């Protein structure tokens, strides 16, 4: 191992450890998906069932098993906890960064560390690396597959094509057939763009197809055999239905993913756009059948990265159901496009500084990240930016960072420092969010503190029910209390004595729902505007 490799290894390990792993337990599981997926994994582990995902003791067939399998292993090693539920995504993000690094070292030497750290520090990657969800597993598999395909296209070695099929199989186990479909669209769009349609036929390699089937299909066959409703629920409703209809009320405008992608690429958005525009201009100047066999591999890789970046954005833009994580597989393409742009810029015009306009915009975006990070507690609890001294301090810190970034990059050869000066505000931002915002995030968005507060007043374990609360809170209470949560809204009122969580000032409604049973007010959880009660035993009174 050379000194350069040792240094790269230490830097990658340090940044991945901080950006993905540090503080995974600082705040509890948030949203509806995190506690739900964490609970499915626990129930599968308790049942020693690696085939059928279970939630509340019933089959829950909305997602494939790769994340659940990873979380089950984490639970078995470290015990069931929220940070263990997030560990698979952190590991998948680390795998993604390493795949990018080794690909660039082999096929684009000189910017392998830059590219890997750019991927690692994208806001979308950092955010989903810390979430208990399937999105990071899909992004890692998708990236590994497409880079494997390009490595085969450039080197001709079938081992790389086999890597493509293996990663596509993992992507199919991560989130379904959308992985293979989306990769196919990217490859077709690229082949049409550069007039290399023969690549599509060459990609259809029988050993690779058999490898894909051997990895991906056994679980699909097994779960279908055990659960005949799987095909309808997973393929028809969760895949085709989500795309063609707004079944789950996730409707957004058609342009939704443009700002989402821009935010997910922060702090590199400005230079990614510049790299994209430059690559499109070069392609336009060189287009045409006459150049189909003349363009060098480096130029073609830029076109490939552009196709990879825009296809998921366009594809999911026409979907009737939109969630931010859907386009996560496109984000590594932006960082790769920027790494390729940086490599060519440094090689061709090392003596020239970067364009002043780009530098200023990049400095404002990268340095400005510290403002919401330092004020995260106000944003979470008050939903606004404060005035006075907190804002002045945040603006002063942001000004210093912006000025430092701009002054560094406008110097001769300043782009060589792009990675270094941009990672400084990224590290400060992540640290500030974890240090200053963790308590507020935990109290206002997670069920963990409420579950602990309720457990602290129990003399013995009791069933828990909810009424008119957010599903995020219901799923979170289920996970943190490790028990099925009854829901009055669905007519599920326990006969035995139990605890009840409901919106504040709901005493009159609760008295009607459990008429004839004694109800005692126990406490108020102000951060999420709910009260909790003790309800005496009695006959069920379905709502």
Image: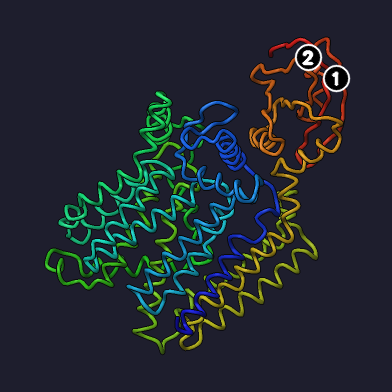
Write down the residue under mark 1.
519
Q: Residue at x 30, y 52 (%)?
A: 165
Q: Pinpoint residue 490: horizontal percent, then vertical percent.
A: 64, 19
Q: Quadrant of the N terminus?
A: bottom left
Q: Residue at x 65, y 69 (%)?
A: 428
**Taking 383 as reference, is 105 left or right?**
left
Answer above or below: position of 248 versus 194.
above
The residue closer to the viewer here, 313 or 47, is: 47
Answer above or below: position of 467 versus 343.
above
The single residue placed furthest to the left in the displayed view is: 290
Q: Determine if residue 273 is in view.
A: no
The residue closer to the viewer here, 483 or 117, is: 483
Q: Determine if residue 126 is in view.
A: yes
How many neighbours does mark 2 have within 10 angstroms: few (below 14), some (14-19), or many (20 or more)? Answer: many
Write down the residue under mark 2.
514
Q: Pinpoint residue 353: horizontal percent, then vertical percent.
A: 45, 84
Is mark 2 in CB contact (under 8 Å) with mark 1? Answer: yes
């Amino acid at each position: 191992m050379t000194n350069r490799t040792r240094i790269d290894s230490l830097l990658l390990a340090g940044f991945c450890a901080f950006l993905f792993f540090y503080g995974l337990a600082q705040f509890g599981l948030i949203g509806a998906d995190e506690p739900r997926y964490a609970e499915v994994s626990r129930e599968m582990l308790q049942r020693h069932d690696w085939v059928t995902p279970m939630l509340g003791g019933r089959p829950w067939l909305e997602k494939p098993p790769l994340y659940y399998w990873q979380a089950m292993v984490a639970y078995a090693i470290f015990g069931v906890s929220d940070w263990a539920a997030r560990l698979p995504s952190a590991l998948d993000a680390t795998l993604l960064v390493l795949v990018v690094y080794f690909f660039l070292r082999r096929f684009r030497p000189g910017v392998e560390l830059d590219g890997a750290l750019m991927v690692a520090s994208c806001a979308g990657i950092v955010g989903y690396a810390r979430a208990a969800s399937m999105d990071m597993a899909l992004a890692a598999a998708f990236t590994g597959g497409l880079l494997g395909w390009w490595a085969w296209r450039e080197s001709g070695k079938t081992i790389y094509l086999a890597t493509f099929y293996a990663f596509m199989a993992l992507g199919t186990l991560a989130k379904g057939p959308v992985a293979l479909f989306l990769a196919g669209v990217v490859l077709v769009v690229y082949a049409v763009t550069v007039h290399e349609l023969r690549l599509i036929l060459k990609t259809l390699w029988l050993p690779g197809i058999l490898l894909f089937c051997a990895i991906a299909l056994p679980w699909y066959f097994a779960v279908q055999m055990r659960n005949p409703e799987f095909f309808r629920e997973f393929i028809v409703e969760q895949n085709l239905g989500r795309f063609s209809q707004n079944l789950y009320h996730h409707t957004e405008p058609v342009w939704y993913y443009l700002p989402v992608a821009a935010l997910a690429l922060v702090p590199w958005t400005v230079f990614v756009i510049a790299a994209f525009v430059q690559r499109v201009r070069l392609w336009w100047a060189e287009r045409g059948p006459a150049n189909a066999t003349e363009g060098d591999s480096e130029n073609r890789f830029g076109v490939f990265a552009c196709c990879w970046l825009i296809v998921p954005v366009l594809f999911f833009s026409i979907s009737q159901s939109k969630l931010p994580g859907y386009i996560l597989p496109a984000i590594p393409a932006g960082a790769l496009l920027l790494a390729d742009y940086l490599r060519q810029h440094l090689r061709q015009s090392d003596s020239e500084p970067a364009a002043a306009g780009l530098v200023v915009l990049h400095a404002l975006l990268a340095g400005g990240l510290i403002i919401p990070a330092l004020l995260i507690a106000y944003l979470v609890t008050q939903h606004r930016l404060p005035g006075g001294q907190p804002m002045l301090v945040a603006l002063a810190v942001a000004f210093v960072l912006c000025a430092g970034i701009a002054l560094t990059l406008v110097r001769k050869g300043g782009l060589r420092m792009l990675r270094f000066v941009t990672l400084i505000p990224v590290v400060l931002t992540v640290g500030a969010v974890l240090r200053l915002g963790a308590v507020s995030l935990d109290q206002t968005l997670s069920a963990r503190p409420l579950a602990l507060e309720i457990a602290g007043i129990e003399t013995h374990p009791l069933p828990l029910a909810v009424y008119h609360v957010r599903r995020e809170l219901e799923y979170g209470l289920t996970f943190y209390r490790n028990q099925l949560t009854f829901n009055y809204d669905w007519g599920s009122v326990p006969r035995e004595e139990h605890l009840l969580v409901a919106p504040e000032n709901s005493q009159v409604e609760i008295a009607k729902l459990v008429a004839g049973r004694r109800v005692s007010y126990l406490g108020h959880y102000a951060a999420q505007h709910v009260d909790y009660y003790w309800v005496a035993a009695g006959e069920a009174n379905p709502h």
